[in-house]
Amino acid sequence: MADTNKPLLIKRYASRRLYNTETSDYVTLEDIAVFIREGREVQIVDLKSGDDLTRQYLLQIIAEHESRGESVLPVDVLTDLVRSYTSQAASVVPQFLQASFEMLREGQSKAMENMGKANPMANMPGFDAMRAQQEAFFKAMTGGLIPGANNATKESDDDLDAIKDQLSALQEKLSKMGK
C-alpha cells in the first residue's frame, strides 16, 4: 500500500512519457487528474534534469478540461490572471487564490457536516431532497478543483429545471410554515 501522505512521484522521460514510480507503469494526464481528484498530491519531475514540472502539467490539465467545454474559470478571471503576470498584483494573486480556495474547501466541509447533523429541519418534509440538491450544488461548484471532491456529473437541462422546480416548491413550503 502506497503512503498517500507524501506526494505521488511521476517521472517524465525524454520521450515525454510519464512514469508512476509507485505502480511502475506509464500514466496519462487524465490519470494524474484522477489522482488529484481523489485527494492525492502529485509531483512531476524531469528524469534527466530533476526539474519540477508539476505546475506546467497541472496547467496543461486545466487547459485541456477548459478546451473540452468543462469551463470552470470565467473569461474575466482568465483575463485578470494574464494581467496579473504583468502588474504589481502578481505578488498578491497567488496568496489570494490560495486563501479563496481554502475558504471554499472549509465552507463545503462545514456545510456538509451541518447538513448531516441532527437538527430540527431534518424532520421537515422534503429535507432529504433539499440536502441532496445542496450536495449536488457543492459538487458542481468544486468538482475537479478541490482535492478530494468528487467530479460532478453533467446534468441535462431537464434535470436542472426539475431541481429548480423542487427548490421552488420547498421554498414555498418553508414560507408557509413560517406564517
Image (cartoon, grey):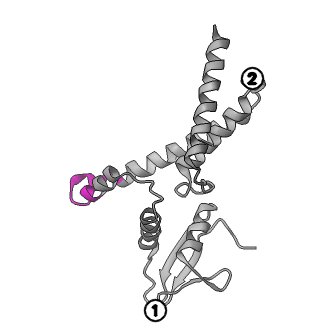
Give 144 or 171, whichever is nearer the viewer: 171
Give 54 or 177, whichever is nearer the viewer: 177
**Vertical comparison of 139 with 122: above or below:** below
Which residue does the numbered mark 2 point to in the structure image? Answer: 124
Which residues lie in the magenta part?
A: 82-93
* Residue 141 horizontal/vertical position (percent): 53, 47
Determine the image quadrant of residue 24. Answer: bottom right
Position of 47 with respect to 2 (left or right) is left
**Vertical comparison of 164 with 98: above or below:** above
**Separation of disc 1 and disc 2 at Cα?**
61 Å
Tag 1: residue type?
Ala
At horizontal 68% and vertical 39% (from top left) the residue drawn is: 132
**Vertical comparison of 62 with 114: above or below:** below
Q: Tell which tag, 1 or 2, sits nearer the viewer.
A: 2
Which residue does the numbered mark 1 point to in the structure image? Answer: 14
* Residue 104 horizontal/vertical position (percent): 52, 44
The disc, 1 or 2, on the residue closer to the chain's N-terminal end is 1
* Residue 5 horizontal/vertical position (percent): 65, 65
Tag 2: residue type?
Met
Give 53 or 116, whichever is nearer the viewer: 116
Give the prevailing secondary structure in the magenta stretch.
helix
Few, some or many C-alpha atoms within 10 Å of disc 1 (few <14, some 14-19, many ≥20)? few
**Vertical comparison of 162 with 139: above or below:** above
